């Protein structure tokens, strides 16, 4: 049978219509990552710091009660964008500092690259912290159509200077005219512009990686003044940082609503690690803090919101890890993860439908002490969760940190037993906890259940056989020389091939 020209046109238009409809039905994705937000720093966890926008979204969605991240910035961001444990990316020890000549491995296909292939427009605002020694390592070469933010791990919130040099980019261009503008306000304004100008015929992925609430501890006076009842000056300013972050979340979600995108938007809210008491952030009643494998360092504030959820207004108690967002979001986007070597699981049916999580264990990390025996601040030790139980080996022995506004005489015995900066820090050689029964890690069961300890150690041997050596490299003096020439932190290792911009 022969088709006329008009017949071909009908077939073509039908296919085009199907493509547009199927593309429009893909959910828009808003991923909000807050930097150093402690477990006890949101009011839906009982904090006296008020987070009304975040609370409302959490209450309307699914709150993740046992959601885990990595204990520090770079490894969590790498796990999110790669779907792999730090031992499989070489990022298991510490963070990437500005002069460090390495990055998230370039042979890894990132989450935004997968989403691009699925038809998404991909945008990032805020903190990168996955390396920038060459252009190939920077966001617009790793799957983002646009990037507005900074490359390093921390900087002044107003001057945008990190270690003597400016760090602020609009795509590849250095931003030099934002001195005095608080970073959350700058990033939020750009996010609103992205949403407002987005073409609805394509699905949107917006990765909003806030600088807040990472140090330095700075916030606008009007936000800090709301917390005059907190006597501790540091905690009060930190509360202001949380407050303006919450305002920004409200402004960004309002932009989605005004653009007509919100009803088809899936929002994920996450911290990247626990809080830092000496910066004003707290994780009590969980033990520990950022930089550690105690629950306070790795159990993250997290929730999912959106009409795509089959159930809402509930808490999900199952295990979820930050690596799980990669396969979950790629599958929801209609992409493919076949053949990808991932540590993450698709947890959508568990979150949305309430079925048991497919994840039954989490490798929190394997960070082996150097042969010299001299531990640096980045050292974390070993942590493994299987079911209800968690094994820790060689971890810094620190205790509980109670927010100043919550302290009373009954708490005094638990205050500041030991912090990481209080050298020397003793190590816990081995400890076993039932996290379900004892989420605060008070009762070591290792001597009571040696058979369980042996099971965990056997499993750790399996992981050790497949781990990559740490990618850490000595700082490169050329990094500072290049920063000095440009007046800003910039890639300093030239590439041999021509790289297309995206």
Image (cartoon, grey):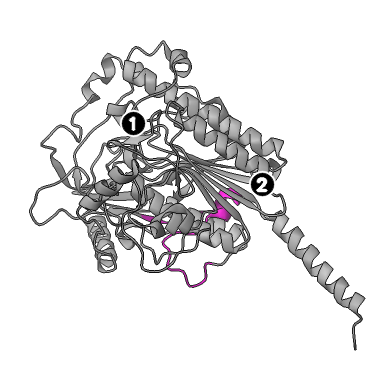
In the image, residue 332 above or below residue 218 = below
Which residue position is annotated with label 1? 215
What residue sits 24% from the left and 46% below the top? 445
Farthest bottom residue in view:
1
Instruction: Answer with the quarter of the image where residue 57 lies.
Output: top right
Q: Residues within 10 Å of mark 1 (few under 14, many from 20)?
A: many
Labelled pair 2, 1 in contact (Cβ < 8 Å): no
Q: What label does residue 198 carry, if any?
A: 2
In the displayed structure, does residue 362 sit left or right of residue 25? left
Of marks 2 and 1, the one in the foreground: 2
In the displayed structure, does residue 241 sit left or right of residue 350? left
How far across and how far down the image is residue 363, in percent? 33, 55
Q: Residues within 10 Å of mark 2 (few under 14, many from 20)?
A: some
- Of residue 366 and residue 25, the one placed in the foreground of this image is 25
- Of residue 283 and residue 246, the one placed in the foreground of this image is 246
What residue sits 35% from the left and 31% below the top? 156
Main SS of the magenta part reads loop
Instruction: Answer with the quarter of the image where residue 183 lies.
Output: top left
Sequence order check, earlier mark of 2 and 1: 2
Name the secondary structure under disc 1. Answer: loop
Magenta stretch: includes residue 126: no
Q: How far is the residue under mark 2 from the one under mark 1?
A: 32 Å
Farthest left residue in view:
372
What residue sits 25% from the left and 48% below the top? 481
How far across and how far down the image is residue 260, in percent? 73, 41
Magenta stretch: includes residue 346: yes
Which residues are the magenta region? 337-362
What residue sits 45% from the left and 39% below the top? 175
Name the secondary structure under disc 2. Answer: loop
In the image, residue 210 above or below residue 207 = above
């Amino acid at each position: 049978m022969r088709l006329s020209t008009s017949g071909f046109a009908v077939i073509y238009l039908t296919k085009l219509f199907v493509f547009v409809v199927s593309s429009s039905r893909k959910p828009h994705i808003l991923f909000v990552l807050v930097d150093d937000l402690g477990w006890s720093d949101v009011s839906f966890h009982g904090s006296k710091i008020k987070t009304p926008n975040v609370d409302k979204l959490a209450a309307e969605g699914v709150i993740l009660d046992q959601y885990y991240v990595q204990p520090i910035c770079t490894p969590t961001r790498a796990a999110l964008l790669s779907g792999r444990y730090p031992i499989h990316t070489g990022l298991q020890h510490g963070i990437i500092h500005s002069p460090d000549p390495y990055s998230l491995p370039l042979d890894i296909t990132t989450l935004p690259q997968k989403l691009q292939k699925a038809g998404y427009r991909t945008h990032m605002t805020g903190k990168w912290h996955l390396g920038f020694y060459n252009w190939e390592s920077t966001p617009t070469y790793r799957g983002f159509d646009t990037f507005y933010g900074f490359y390093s791990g921390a900087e002044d919130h107003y001057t945008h200077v990190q270690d003597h040099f400016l760090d602020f980019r609009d795509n590849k261009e250095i931003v030099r005219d934002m001195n005095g503008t608080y970073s959350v306000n700058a990033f939020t304004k750009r996010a609103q512009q992205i949403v407002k100008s987005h073409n609805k015929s394509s699905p949107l992925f917006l990765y909003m990686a806030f600088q807040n609430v990472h140090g330095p501890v700075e916030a606008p006076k009007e936000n800090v003044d709301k917390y005059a009842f907190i006597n501790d000056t540091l905690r009060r300013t930190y509360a202001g940082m949380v407050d303006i972050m919450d305002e920004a979340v409200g402004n960004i979600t309002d932009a989605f609503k005004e653009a007509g995108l919100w009803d088809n938007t899936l929002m994920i809210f996450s911290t990247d690690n626990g809080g830092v008491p000496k910066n004003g952030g707290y994780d009590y009643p969980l033990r520990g803090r950022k930089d550690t494998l105690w629950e306070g360092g790795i159990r993250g504030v997290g929730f999912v919101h959106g009409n795509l959820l089959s159930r809402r207004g509930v808490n999900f108690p199952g295990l979820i890890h930050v690596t799980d967002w990669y396969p979950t979001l790629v599958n929801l986007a209609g992409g493919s993860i076949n053949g990808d070597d991932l540590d993450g699981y698709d947890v959508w049916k568990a979150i949305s439908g309430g079925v048991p999580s497919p994840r039954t264990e989490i490798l929190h990390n394997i960070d082996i002490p150097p042969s010299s025996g001299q531990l640096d601040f980045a050292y974390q030790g070993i942590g493994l969760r299987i079911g209800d139980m968690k094994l820790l080996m060689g971890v810094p022995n620190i205790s509980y940190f109670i927010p100043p506004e919550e302290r009373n005489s009954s708490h005094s015995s638990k205050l500041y037993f030991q912090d990481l900066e209080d050298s020397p820090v003793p190590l816990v050689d081995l400890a076993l906890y039932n996290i379900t029964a004892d989420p605060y890690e008070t009762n070591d069961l290792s001597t009571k259940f040696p058979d369980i300890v042996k099971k965990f150690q056997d499993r750790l041997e399996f992981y050790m056989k497949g781990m990559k050596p740490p990618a850490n490299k000595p700082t490169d003096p050329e990094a500072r020389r290049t920063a000095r020439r440009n007046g800003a932190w910039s890639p300093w290792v030239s590439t041999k091939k021509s790289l297309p911009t995206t």
